[in-house]
Image (tube, grey):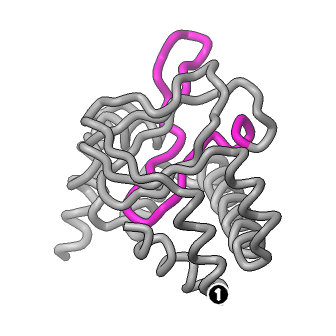
Amino acid sequence: MISELIAAVGRDVKLRAADEALIGAGFKERRFKRNAVLLQCGEVAHEAFFLLSGTLHQFYIDEAGRERTCNFCFEKEFITDLESFSQQTRSASSIKALTPVHCLSIRCTDLVALLQQSPAMAEFFRILVERVAQRSIRRTKSLLSFSAEQQLQELTDERPDIFQHVPQRYIAQYLGIAPESLSRIRKRLMQAAKS
């Protein structure tokens, strides 16, 4: 299982045998059942997760008490509440398994040690955080500039299989629309694709 993480890291940086050994020592294999909560809002995010299989849903509860989806995580992706994890403060979001999940996890203290001992891993995590920032900027731009239809098109272009992994209500939350609106928009997009 560590080999999948090493392969993912190796696509961005060159790893030595010593780096691979440090990765193997730092990351632990974990399994979670469907609906398991990996991080509860208000808790400190002590772990970051690398998904081997399954789907995770990251969300927060707004002032009106409504659940708001802010992120999904799929195979070969990392997830945590980055602010909570990096600063060891209370998390603003929760992370929940939408399916059974098989993953690797690393504790914050172990990651700090790994980054100090492995320049390659430090470079990889710099690249990873840069990608997270770029994705966040694209998401903000999409929310501010695009219609729900354009946002859905962008999401399905990026993740064509999202409807097979994520319940429609969470996709609707992510887009900030009602599930009924999502059904109508999705139907229009499918009809447009056929013509």
Pick the front one: 151 or 18: 18
Residue tagged 1: 16
Q: Are there few (<14), some (14-19), or many (20+) residues within 10 Å of tag 1?
A: few
Look at the image and say whether residue 67 sits in the magenta stretch. yes
Pick the front one: 28 or 74: 28
- Magenta stretch: give its range: 60-85
Which x, y percent locates residue 187?
21, 53
Q: Residue at x 76, y 28 (%)?
A: 89
Q: Amino acid at mark 1?
A: Arg
Which x, y percent locates residue 191?
19, 64
For the C terminus, the quadrant is bottom left
Above or below 188: residue 9: below
Residue 142: quadrant of the picture:
bottom right
Pick the front one: 44 or 61: 44
Above or below 61: residue 111: below
Q: Secondary structure at mark 1?
A: loop
Above or below 129: residue 86: above
Look at the image and say whether residue 82 sits in the magenta stretch. yes
**In the image, 130: left or right of 153?**
right
Which x, y percent locates residue 154?
46, 64
**In the image, 116: left or right of 141?**
right
Residue 182: quadrant of the picture:
top left
